[in-house]
Image: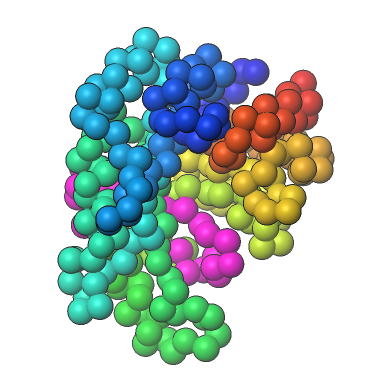
Amino acid sequence: MKFPFRLGTSSYIIPADILPNVYYLAGKVQDVELVLFDVDGGPSNLPTPAQIAELHSFAADHDLTFTVHLPLDLRMAADGGPAHISLEKALRVIELTQALHPWAYIAHLDGRDILPAETTTPAAILRWQDQAVQALEIVGSWVGDLNKLALENLESYPLELNLAVLERIAVSRTVDVGHLWLDGHAPLPYLRAALPRTRVVHIHGISEHDHSSLAHVPPAELGAVFAELVSSNYTGVVTLEVFSEQDFLGSIQAIELVTA
């Protein structure tokens, strides 16, 4: 399959750590989304500096790029300061992975304090927006380029929450088509409006849960999304955000069928 964009998937396709997954995916995709977690006093999958060096060398030899998913939804501390665990984790991940020259760092905003939106005051929403912009400015300064920080739309969150923030800061966007499907939004109008500023597109099917194989998406709907990406000459990354070999291979087959 030849597209103007780089096709990718997550670093959890086979039941193994990040390095074996990257080895497995070489030749099958052009980008790997590093899905990282680091729980204080609990599990962590953060690569060591030696593993980062190995990833860098292997990627250079196999035409691979990386996107990096920051581990926690970004927010400021309760007092409005920067000493919040989500920012501390983001800094640790950014410092560790910068040697990979990631195509993008993917970020969520933590909007739980203002949900449900219809019961929240305008003053609380404005305060949340101010703090969201401040958090993105801080993390963007660590990345070194606001354009490489890509804000993602989340399921069950009103789309206008992110849009108001995006009007105030020049970060990029991650459009998650699967989240749009999950919430019953038609993806094409949103995608068309967002693409000029979109660095990464996430796509996945919905069965018993989201992040399932694209084989669960009606072919006409899936074909329309890929036709839009191709006709727009989108040159970013499109990530099949699934987490098993079966869902990955099923997604590849579904794409082949609708783009043949």
The image quadrant of residue 50 is: top left
Residue 73 percent location from the top left of the image: 38, 60
Residue 106 place in picture, x, y as percent:
40, 47
Report whether residue 56 is seen: no
> Where is the C terminus found, in terms of image quarters?
top right
Q: Is residue 214 left or right of residue 88?
A: right
Q: Judge left or right: residue 81 versus residue 56.
A: left
In the rendered image, residue 168, in percent from the top left (x then y), is placed at 34, 63
Q: Is residue 173 visible?
A: yes
Question: Where is the N terminus found, in terms of image quarters?
Answer: top right
Q: Nearer the viewer, residue 17 or 145?
A: 17
Placement of 126 over or under 68, stated as above or below: below
Q: Magenta stretch containing residue 139, yes or no?
A: yes
Residue 26 magenta? no
What residue is drawn where x is 35% and y is 40%?
45
> Which of the 4 image quarters holds residue 243?
top right
Instruction: Please give left or right for residue 61 compared with residue 196 in the image.
Output: left
Instruction: Residue at 42% x, 12% y: name it.
Output: 62
Q: Residue at x 37, y 18 (%)?
A: 59
